[in-house]
Amino acid sequence: MVTRTRVEYELLGALRDLAKATLPLGRLLTELNSLLREPMGYDGSCWHGTDPATGFVTSTVAENLDPRGFERAAALEMWAPEPLTFTRLRASGRRAATLLQAARGHPEDSARFRELLQPVGFGDELRINFDLPSGCWGSAVFMRSADRGPFTARELGLAERLAPHISQLLCRAYPSDLTEGPEPLLPGVAVLGPTGKLMSVDSRGEAVLEELAETIPSPNGIPTGFIAVAEHARGVAATGRAGLPSRSRVRTHRGRWLTLHATLLDGAPSGQVAIVAAPATPSEILPMALMGMGLSAREQDVAVLVLRGHDTATISRALYITPATVQDHLKSIFTKSGVRSRRAFAARLMGPLVTAALPPAR
């Protein structure tokens, strides 16, 4: 009999091998799915890449799921009083949880369960957030057939212990500099109808959709990032909630950073949503680069001031910390970014772009 320790040891070794392979995000998620399917015992899965700063879903790799339910799943995730969502899981301070656990044994209280899981034979789901102090790097949902019973405490514990290692893998899949890849795309516009169908798109929007195309697309052929910001815009209108704008950063297959902006054309949740996809500005990419280096929130604050050209004394006053603390943060920043000086750190992030992204030093 293979012990739990032996299974975990083998999985950690496989994760180390994946780290050496430096795969692009989509391929990495596919490999992770194949690796965990048997030890976690799931029959369907959905892996997501996310915007590290906002947690918005930006890409999807799914197995044994009907893509026709994705728009509805996105709406329930963002706005319904579901017992288990990625946001609720994050707020609980846990990395993983099961639906049966969150619903206290009454999965029928979940609209997601009633509408999307139970009709196709799933009886439980297990969710994982791949978060680090530097940002939200991805998430996953595992579904199990009802005839196999719920996920066990052992499987949940395994998911929680593997989550930090997978989080590091996903973080490394994002570039930690401000390179834009090929020639930037021009801004494009797409309009989605109430059911997520593409109503109109300009030629530049078509180019964006092509670069964001997924292996298992939605029935309407719309990429995950577009669906997520569109559903968020609808939810904001339906609930009257302000706060996080309907905006997300995504990286295309060719390495270009884009920002998606969604807005309702007539202000009604049942109306059409216009999505503008524009090249991300250096100031929009900079937080991603700093997060990708694994910098903590305070280290990011110090790094931004360093890139603005401020000296230690100025940083100390601006952040209300001692000069010695600033130096401690700088040592950590240099270690994580693999450099030895402020000049080298700025060069690591492509200094000209950083300079353009930030206001001049005072």
Image: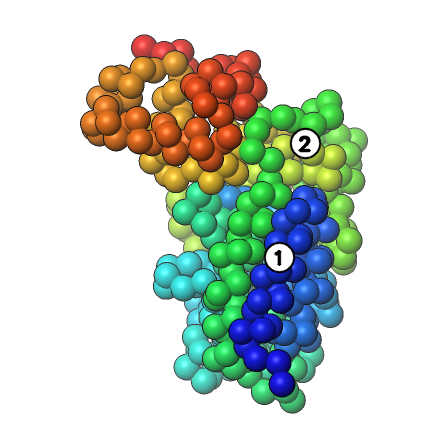
Residue in the picture at 41% in, 81% down:
104
Most foreground residue, 266 or 52: 52
Most foreground residue, 261 or 19: 19
Placement of 334 over or under 197, stated as above or below = above
Badge 1 crowding class, 10 Å Cα cut-off, few under 14, some 14 to 19, many 20 or more, is some
Count of marks overlaid on the render: 2
Which x, y percent locates residue 355? 49, 15
Asked whether, in this view, residue 316 is left or right of residue 337, the answer is left
Q: Nearer the viewer, mark 1 or mark 2?
A: 1
Most foreground residue, 55 or 337: 337
Residue in the picture at 39% in, 14% down:
309
Most foreground residue, 84 or 355: 355
Residue in the picture at 34% in, 15% down:
310
Residue occupied by mark 1? 15
Q: Amino acid at mark 1?
A: Leu
Residue occupied by mark 2? 256
Placement of 346 over or under 241, stated as above or below = above
Instruction: Note whether residue 220 is visible.
Output: no
Q: Amino acid at mark 2?
A: Arg
As helix, strand or loop, the secondary structure at mark 2 comes to: loop
Q: Report the Cα–Cα distance between label 1 and label 2.
A: 27 Å
Which x, y percent locates residue 240? 41, 51
As helix, strand or loop, the secondary structure at mark 1 comes to: helix
Q: Quadrant of the C terminus?
A: top left
Asked whether, in this view, residue 48 is left or right of residue 99, the answer is right
Location of residue 265 by image quarter = top right
